[in-house]
Amino acid sequence: MITSQFDAVIPMLCVALAGLVVLLAEAFRDRGEKMPIGGLAIIGLLGALVTSAPWPSSLTTLFGGNPSLWDRNATSFGVVTADNFSLFVVCVIAVTGIITVIFSSQTIERDGLPAGEYYAILLFSIFGMMLMAQANDLLLIFLALETMSIGVYVLTGIRRDNAAGTEAAFKYFLLGAFASSFFLYGIAFLYGVTRSTHLEAISSSIAAQSMSGNPLILLGVGLLIVGFAFKIAAVPFHMWSPDAYEGAPAVVTGFMSTGVKAAAVAAFVRVFLNALGPMVADWAPVLALIAAATMILGTVVGVAQTSLKRMLAYSSIAHGGYMLTALVAGSGAGGETGKAAILFYLAAYSLTNLGAFGVIALLGTRERANDDLRDYAGLWHSHPGLATLMTFFLLSLGGFPPTAGFIAKWYVFSAAIGSDYYGLAIIGVLSSVVSVFFYLRIVVMMYMTERDARPVPAQISRIAMAGLVLSLIGILYLGVLPAKLIAFAQASISTIF
């Protein structure tokens, strides 16, 4: 139970302090000295997880001021919100960070990455993600977005001797800066009309003055959609993701495809379903169109890929479309199921996709990434444990029972039907069926194809294998006993409406 307003930021403080401690440890570490820097990162993330798990029974806001001086329309003035919704997302991000750190130990040692810099940047990016989930003001969301993004840009190109990684980071940075400018201009237009950047004040102003048809409001909303759609890699703002996912280290790619998406979707939900709720008739059709295009393109183009990382990049695009479908369904009449489906999908997808990229990261060597489909031929004979784990992760991505992916997709499509978005539900089901082809193609390669002479690691870190097993336990638990997390999701999403 949160007992004071400053308790609400303890999860973020745990992560930020862990990042500072990691920097100090790296500064005092002698060359060649081994130090458990990853353990320090895990301690900070566990602290964030533990302090955010006892959810409050009521809304807590903080870091405000005098409404008459700052925002005459604000009724809940705090710019940081600690409600069940934000803390649910914080828990998802913390678990994502812990599993990423576990997978990173072998990658850092193998590729000779600077451990202190890597873990510090990772932690500061996670801090930005958590702040983005708890922000209740558009300007603070923008600052959190940039804090998260700058760290991810650096992690994408952290292998400085890798030309593909450097190119990917440069593309990601340029396109990300371009998208951020759209987002900032959207904030400016909304502020110009409503005279506020506080989400609740914006909602009250739009509802009180019936501004839904105002051209400046519509332009501002459109620019915000561009900024958010870029971060979740929604069509047509997805062009950065295949190159960035392929060029970054596999463990970073897994972190990007889950943590970044979770934070962006959380802010997307809070801004559009809360602040822009009075304009739902204006933006819901646009997001429905984007969701449909995202599911179709992500699935169709993914079928043609031969690189596993690029294939999972397009898979991630398609899954972004499923999350947008849940968001649109949550905006309709009787959309409570869709609102809760967003959070459940985030948790299920994060565990599944992290596990899949974790396998790719562990199978890579210093000489080659081993991320081509042919590299998985006969994997069952050389690494049966990894082949088994990868099979479950792929089945969950494809939506097979009894995995979390099946429950998550069923939940989203049920919400779409319940809100009368039958077209989105049909497109989602068909795209999910088509995606089964490229997921099962990898399974066939692992079990039914002879392996060629490509090198694979002789040994896999036990700690990393433990991380994969934890991910597997999570997706099987959510696939068999999802009721408790669904109830948590429903209780969490209700606190922002």
Image (cartoon, rainbow, N blue to C red):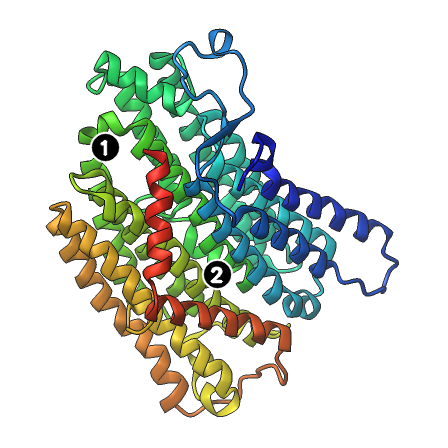
Q: Residue at x 35, y 46 (%)?
A: 491
Q: Give the camera-side residue of 276 and 65.
A: 65
Q: Pointer 2 and pointer 1: residues touching (CB < 8 Å)? A: no
- Where 178 sits versus 314, above or below? above
Q: What residue lies at 45% left-to-right and 72% top-to-bottom?
A: 472
Tag in front: 2 or 1: 1
Question: Viewed as shown, does residue 36 lie left or right of 248?
Answer: right
Above or below, 57 relative to 322: above
Question: Residue 378, located in which quarter of the rendered image?
Answer: bottom left
Left or right, 275 with respect to 169, comes to: left
- Give the residue type at disc 1: Trp
Q: Residue at x 61, y 48 (%)?
A: 154
> Where does the image place residue 357, in percent across and percent down from the top left?
48, 66
Q: Residue at x 31, y 22 (%)?
A: 203
* First of labels 2, 1 by sequence position: 2
Which quadrant of the figure has residue 405? bottom left
Q: Picture coordinates of residue 22 (x, y %)? A: 74, 51
Q: Dot 2: within a 10 Å radius of its alpha carbon, few (fewer than 14), some, or many (20 or more) residues?
A: many
Q: Which residue is mark 1?
A: 283
Task: Looking at the picture, tell me which residue is in the foreground, 448 or 57.
Answer: 57
Q: Give the residue furthest to the top.
A: 68
Label 1, secondary structure: give it: helix
**394 to the left or right of 460:** left
Please state the horizontal and vertical placement of residue 55, each as a whole percent of the image: 48, 45
Q: Is residue 301 visible?
A: no
Q: Which residue is mark 2?
A: 246
Could you tell me residue 161's position as x and y percent? 66, 59
Rate crowding at label 1 as few (under 14), some (14 to 19) or many (20 or more) other CA atoms within 10 Å.
some
